[in-house]
Amino acid sequence: FDDTFDASLNVLSSQGYVVVKPSVGFETGYPGEAWLKGVTAAANAVIEAGIADSSKLGVYGTSYGGYATNLLITQTGRFRAAVNVSGKVDMVSFYTDSPRLGVRNVHAAEKSQDRIGATLWQAPQKYIAHSAIFYADRITTPLLLITGAQDPNVPADNTREMYYALRRLGKPVTWVNYINSGHGTPGTTADDFNDYHTRISAFFDRHLKAGGASGAVEATSLTGQPLYRPEPQGATREKMEAQLDTARRAYGHTPANVDSIIWLGRRTAYLGRFNDAIDIYTKGIAAFPNDARLYRHRGHRYLSTRQLPKAIADFERAYAMTKGKADVVEPDGQPNARNIPTSTLNGNIRYHLALAYYLTGQFEKALPIYREDIAASKGNPDMLVATSHWLYMALRRLNRSEEAAAVLTPITASMDVIENGAYHRLLLLYKGELAESAVLRNFGSDGDLQDITTAYGVGNWHLYNGRKARADEIFTQILGAQSQWASFGYLSAEAERARNVVQ
């Protein structure tokens, strides 16, 4: 907010970090919303400018900035690491608690910095809404808390509440309390000052550098760049690790059961360990060479790791093995909101085989597979919109516009689509029933899987309609969202770059 010397900024920038100090426009009564909008806008701007990697964002603040940081990570999971220095987490207890400043805390909340704009008794819900402690269960970002035991402004005990809350919730948190220091950066001794900056640097290095906590290179992109293991964070990771442990135990009890092998591979892959999953499926194929499911799942992870020829070979093998046989529902390892499976074994084999052809520029070869998949999708809106989207794009890339238009005929806005909403909206865009702004509304914010899927479809729409500059702009933005490199939208944009379709 000012241009005075900032030791922490200089330390971090000297170690290769881009540090941004955003200006935030506040409105009395809504400081939390202001922080979310302001910091998110700043993060989006540096990502879109190509300065920052969306998968390696950290956030930190001191005093009011620490309070804002802690409140921010209760509302978004986009940051990989957060540091709160001397920031309150409980507005209710802070309201009348200050060992030195007395009524200052009341004034700050009602009329000054904290901008609640009312007393605790006039607007109790405002105080709760702006207290991160009440929403600690929503936090998924690893958090470093730093306090000074002699702090006369924000008592260390206030910040400590968050430490014990997150420990109780089993979430990643570290608390460092400098016994002889006060508010903000510890400066009582040179040792404390240096220790403080060493800890912050090490914390961000651990979570933001070298691809995250593991730093494992899981694949090489089609353009020759290392792709780091996309590890889930916080509660999501804990849940997936527990599911993997269950799968390991099941496999240990029945190692000769093909279902145990498949679920061990799937649970391993959900944690971003694609090559480990490939090894599991390969061993399974050695024991069960005639089970198409093993080829289908290994082929999927060959796609993830950019081994496209191997993926095609596996999917072609699985396709030949299931051709003409009765289809079966494929259980979903990550169920949708209604817990209704929307895919089948044969459908997934066809879908991924055609996608592999598409990614390698073999659009003509993908067409009959997509058409077969659409014929089999009767009564399954999710399967219909997903396949129709890729078939439409393949036809447009082949300049077969009339055939492509026919693909859109059965697509309506009223379809009951459960989990493939991104494909559904894209098809309505292609029909002219939705505007680009209505479809691409979230991209560049949190960069989740559906955003990337949507962005690729919109970029491709511009490409085959002759707007190559806009297509290139969108593909560049997609490739900046590196946390989503395992998604098919990201892989497709990468394939376009690798084939020099846009540059």
Image: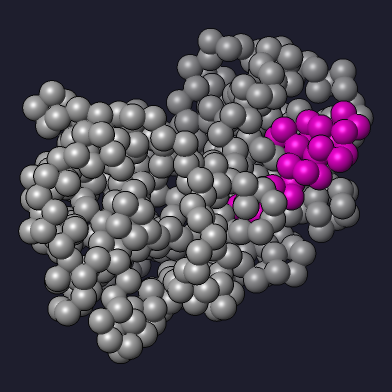
Judged left or right of residue 188, residue 93 is left
Q: Height in image: 100 above or below 72?
A: below
Judged left or right of residue 340, residue 379 is right
What residue is at 36 percent from the left and 85 percent from the top?
Answer: 194
Colouring method of the image: one colour
Picture coordinates of residue 224, whole percent (x, y): 75, 69
Name the one closer to the observer, 173 or 456. 173
Would you say the magenta stretch is mainly helix, strand or loop?
A: helix
Q: Quadrant of residue 177?
A: bottom left
Name the one closer to the observer, 267 or 16. 16
The answer to whether residue 447 is visible is: no
Which residue is the extreme one toward the bottom? 191
Q: Which residues are magenta?
A: 457-484
Name the one closer to the observer, 226 or 137. 137
What residue is at 38 percent from the left and 74 percent from the top?
Answer: 200
What residue is at 88 percent from the left and 49 percent from the top?
Answer: 501
Picture coordinates of residue 407, whole percent (x, y): 74, 20
Judged left or right of residue 154, residue 441 is right
